Amino acid sequence: MDKSKYHLLSDSEAVSILAGFMIGVGFLALPNQVAKEAKNDAGIATIVGGIYPLYFALLSIYYCKKHPNEDILKLSKRYLGNIIGTICNILFMAQFIIYIAAGASGYKNVLVTYAARFLTPMRVFFIVIGIGAYVNFVGLKPLARINKIALFLTIIVTSILSMSLIKGRYLNFLPVLGTGINKIIKGSLESAYAYSGMEGVLLLYPLMKNKDKIAAISLKAVALVIGIYSWIVLMSIYYLGYKVTSKSLWPVLLVTESANLPFINSFRLVFLLFWSLNVFKLTANEYYAAVYIIQDTLKIKKSKHRNMIILGVMPIIIWLCLYLGEEVKRRAILDYIIPKAILFSIFYAAVIAIAIFINDKKKNKSIG
Amino acid sequence: MNSSSYKEVETVNQIKNMKNIKNILLICVCVIIYTYYSAAMVDEKTIEEYDVSSGFGVDLYRDAAGTVKYSIPFSVLVFRGGNRQYSMIKTGEAPTGAETRQNRQLKTDKQFLIGSQKVLVFSESLVGYGLKYNADIEFNNTKINDRAIIVVCEGRTEDILRYKVKGYASSPEYIEGMVKNSMTNDFFSREYTILNMYVRLDTEGRNLVLPYMKISDKGLEITGLALFKGDKMVNKVEVDEAKFMNMMRENELLRGYLSIQKNSDEFMNFYGNTKRRVKCNKVKEGYEFEIIIDIKGDVIANTLYKEFNGKTKKELEKALSKDVEKKCSEFINKMQNEYKIDCLELGMYAASKYGRDTGVDWNEVVSNSVIKVKANVKVDKVGRGAY
């Protein structure tokens, strides 16, 4: 990896790439999944679900303070030993590959149902994964710029959703906390998939220009994503009520119909267009993370060999995408896999944080 | 000197060749990608090859054996040179909604685009049977225009769709305009759309209301509103009554006329905006609702009061308020004793305050609870003077 000054991420790029690791496919289906459990308190559940990325943000601050130039891959090898560390890293990589497949197949399902039903799954996957691979050939800096553009567009498009403010009813939120704490926590667990991806920060912090600002950067990214997500969920509940929200597979697209823009027949397609960019960007991000981990494990320095990895991973991802299939099957499989992946990454990050802590104390003692 | 410059030229040429090869490769890749993706489009047709329709109806009837059958007529536009347009009715009949498509295709020369319609006409027989089965197929269809307008009609929907309005290619276009503009003068809501139907059918304490339409001797006419209980139409109200119902029911700004008339020479007309608030309280015997209607507007015509000053203005406001309150209470009385449904969506307020999904039948609760109405009329403008 080239770490010359030019290739490091500036602050705004770092914020948008971290947010970009989260915002993606989960975006459209999120209100549906949360409302199924948390009902009219889905908004609160989404905010509570934000604890998950916040956890990684806080850990990354701690990591960065202790080891500003070593990412989690090197730390795990150092503290857990070479073999266990490598196994953990490979599992960590597998998680990103699953997320890519989940994202791309989710995108295919939306695209084929809403916009282009003539496209075969293979054709969609080639485009999505192909773009992800292409951006990875070019490097980290362009990736960060794409993330920046995508974030701006996402904010603009989600703010257009507020047009439904005229037609909805605030009564749909009431009674606040009426569904009970249990259900709200269950709902917030449902939002975990949408928030997943923040793990990427553990790989990225050595690549930032201003490492002393890591706290501000990661917290800003988390706050932005929590803001966007809770806004979407609140809008869906506000406009549709929780029952319709939990019936529609992609309720956000139903809300977009309420936006009555001049000259635009259906805002839904415009929304899908911008959202597509989000999916491409997310795929590229996670692709980057996966390739980065493989590169680290195999100790590859040459860019030619890196390109080989990028192409080599592609068929695996496309096979996984095809395996996930249509939406009902996809959600069933993901409901099984994602909790485990999330638990793993929480556990993994925590173990290394504890190892750093213990080691640090020992060092202090030996000095003192 | 010479040899080195030759070498330079050679390397430059080599680089140029490399660039050429790269460009050719790029073009090849583009062509391959294009053919790969356009191969997917082989079965797709251009929009000219589809039947364009402006609206469709949904009818339901029972055949001799007693099984339910759907009859779904489409009003299809026919383009034939120049600007002249015609519309045709193409009907499909089958035991389920989706199957009507295959039946209809047998009578049609083109493929159908289902979902781009502006108007959906439901027959009384369908809404009497239940709307849920039909709402499902619409909810599932991603191509549907969720802002399409729904009306309920008397008799067969085919007759409404076939009705010729002079100057219009098809009647749905006319119906769309009728419903959209009924809000300007008749206290109608803006929202009689499909999206609204999904929301109303499925939210606790809310009931659907749709414009009711028929062909009278003067042509197409909105005669009132169809009242729903759950997904079934159970009753209908006339326009005069619907006015006061909407005033108490709709959350949005409504516009329309109110008047006081003593005799044919002494009367007063008023055009105003209404907005209402609802308060809900739980008391010993059940629930207590208070509806406060704020009306603001202009005096349009006035022969009732000779002189219009501060005193008579207040008098007028009071008289109008009383009139509105009286008519609203009359409607509430009728609703509680005759219709026995919660047309005013009061259940939603109670549910949002005292808990959802508790299994309460809000239609019953509202029919048995105390509902008070208060109206505040304010005269904003009086025009350019009384004549």
Image (cartoon, rainbow, N blue to C red):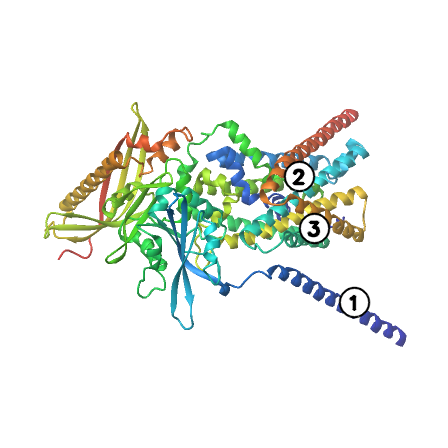
Q: Which quadrant of the figure contains the C terminus of chain B?
A: bottom left
Subunit bearing disc 3: A
Task: Say whether marks 1 and 2 touch (CB < 8 Å).
Answer: no
Residue at (46, 61) in percent of width and height: B108
Cα gap from disc 1 to disc 3, whole angstroms:
27 Å
Cα gap from disc 1 to disc 2, whole angstroms:
42 Å
* Quarter of image, res B88: bottom left
Residue A83 picture location, percent across and down: 81, 34
Q: Residue under label 2, please give it.
A: A199
Residue at (65, 35) in percent of width and height: A342
Quick one: SS at disc 1?
helix
Q: Residue under label 3, please give it.
A: A140
Q: Is residue A10 visible?
A: no
Which amino acid, mark 3? Answer: Leu
Residue B158 picture location, percent across and down: 35, 55
For this orientation, the residue located farthest to the front is B65
Subunit bearing disc 2: A
Which amino acid, mark 1? Answer: Met
Subunit bearing disc 1: B
Tags 2 and 3 on a common chain: yes
Q: Residues within 10 Å of mark 1 (few under 14, many from 20)?
A: few
Q: Residues within 10 Å of mark 2 (few under 14, many from 20)?
A: many
Tags 1 and 2 on a common chain: no
- Between B310 and A343, the one lying in front of the other is A343
User: Left or right of A247: which side holds A364?
Assistant: right
Q: Residue under label 1, please give it.
A: B18
Q: Which quadrant of the figure contains the N terminus of chain B?
A: bottom right
1 vs 3, front mark: 1
Quick one: SS at disc 2?
helix
Residue B252: assigned label = none
Residue B121 picture location, percent across and down: 37, 52
Q: Is residue A322 visible?
A: yes
